[in-house]
Image: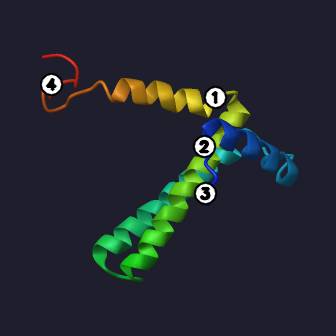
Amino acid sequence: MNDIFDFEQLQLEQGVWQEQNFPNAGRHECFYGIVEEIGELSHAILKMDQGIRGTKVEHMAAAKDAIGDIVIYLAGLCNKRGINLQSAVETAWNEVKERNWVKYPKDGRTD
């Protein structure tokens, strides 16, 4: 687990894997997978907060798994749609990190 790779490497590897395993997958399967995994993440968080159907450790493991799967499905969605995941995340982060909701509660940027 010491190997570190960025979103571009993930996207490249995911594309090869997807073509080997699901060569006939359409453009929507990855989106539906993201939605399914968000449901799993929601379930894990809800049950953890309610303190039912498992332990905190089990729910945290399920949440971590869902988050990882969401990112992998996002890489696949980007492959299918011709989007560079690395660039999309960097662009979004550069916008978000400039916002200051404490100083500018109306829109995060101006009075």
**The residue tagged with tag 4: helix, strand or loop?**
loop
Q: Mark 2 is on which residue type? A: Leu
C-alpha span from label 2 to label 3: 23 Å
The residue pinned by badge 4 equals 104
* Residue 68 versus residue 43 in the image, above or below: above
Q: Which residue is denoted by mark 1 in the rendering?
A: 84
Q: Which amino acid, by three-letter code, is at mark 1?
A: Asn
Earlier in the chain: of badge 3 and badge 1, it is: 3
Going by the numbered disc 4, the residue's amino acid type is: Tyr
Relative image position of residue 107 (x, y in whole percent)? 22, 24
Name the N-terminal-most of marks 1 and 2. Answer: 2
Q: What residue type is labelled 3?
A: Asn
* Tag 2 residue: 74
Q: Which tag, 2 or 3, sits closer to the chain's start?
A: 3
* SS class, disc 1: loop
3 or 4: tag closer to the N-terminus: 3
In the visual, does 12 lie left or right of 5? Answer: right
Residue mark closest to the camera, 1 vs 2: 1
